[in-house]
Amino acid sequence: MELRLDQLSVDLGGRRVVEQLDLDVTAGEVVGLVGPNGSGKSTALRCVYRALRPSAGVVRLDGEVLDSLSLRETARRTSALTQDGGADVDFTVAELVALGRTPHQRGPVRLSAAERELCERAMAQTDVLHLAGRGVLSLSGGERQRVLLARALVQEPQLLVLDEPTNHLDLRHQVRLLSHLRATGLTILVVLHDLNLAAAACDRLALMSAGRLVAVGTPADVLTAERIAEVYGVEVQLTRHPLTGDPQVLFALDRSQPKEIR
């Protein structure tokens, strides 16, 4: 599936938070949205999974205007993992993951054998199969994040929209998650704050600042010391990963700041 954000603008609270965003994500491509807090990344994503209606411009899926599709059809094509996607009801892990099949069903029906196998496979891929009988509210933040990703995969989308999917995850699960996402072959638009993870996981990066697209291209093209200093206000050095050649952002803490008096 191909995704296009065409001159997308969003106004919230009387302020324009996304300004004429143009971005293409080709079929099977992983594109990362990066940028400082408040740069409009999550707002743009919310337009893609229809939690927000853009003030101007359109979102297109395979050339079709998103608003022309029914919500059910959108849910069959697109799955989202959001920052606020937790569960308030204490479903078991297996029950919550099974909810990912809802867009493909009509009314309250039992899962087929193939759907149960799909759920188990998604839980195994996200390392939560051993938690299947646990209540979701008893899980750690990282465990819950992996459960929500399993639910998104069970939806069998063509487009996966992820807002900080590595949030709460330890290093092992960050690497495992991003490696698995790359292997799915899905079209993926993902917000990531860790620039080194973004460089490793994404085919292209789209750097945003103050609601505008600053640069788009390969990680090596987008992540330059000058551009990071301009957008983030932080002096960094760039090097190459010795195994993959991906750009790596190096920084040093300012140790000249006075220590807090306790």
Image (spheres, grey):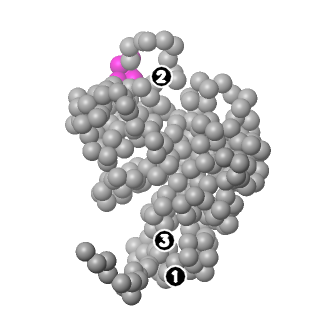
Identify the residue position indicated by label 2 in the image. Answer: 102
User: Where's the N terminus, which quadrant?
Assistant: top right
Kindly identify which residue carries mark 3: 246
Residue type highlighted by circle 1: Glu
In this view, the residue farthest toward the front is: 262
**Mark 3, secondary structure of its residue:** loop
Q: Amino acid at mark 2?
A: Thr
Kindly report the distance in space between the C-alpha atoms of the residues bearing marks 2 and 1: 47 Å
Of circles 3 and 1, the one toward us is: 1
Q: Is residue 220 above or below residue 148?
A: below
Residue drawn at (75%, 54%), measured in percent from left and top? 20
Q: Quadrant of the C terminus?
A: bottom left
Instruction: Read off the magenta span.
Output: 112-116
Q: Which residue is mark 1?
A: 235
User: Residue type at mark 3?
Assistant: Asp
140 in the magenta segment:
no
**Residue 80 spot, x, y in % from top left:** 51, 39
Q: Quadrant of residue 33?
A: bottom right
Q: Name the dominant secondary structure of the magenta segment.
A: helix
Dot 3, crowdedness within 10 Å: few (<14), some or many (≥20)?
A: some
At x 55%, y 48%, the residue is 188
Of tags 2 and 1, the one toward the viewer is 1
The numbered mark at residue 149 is none
Q: Is residue 115 magenta?
A: yes
Expressed as whole percent of the image width and height from the top left, the position of residue 40 reads 62, 55
Horizontally, residue 8 falls left or right of residue 164, namely right
Q: Is residue 26 above or below residue 73?
A: below
Q: Nearer the viewer, mark 2 or mark 3?
A: 2
Q: Tell me if I can see residue 204 in this picture.
A: no
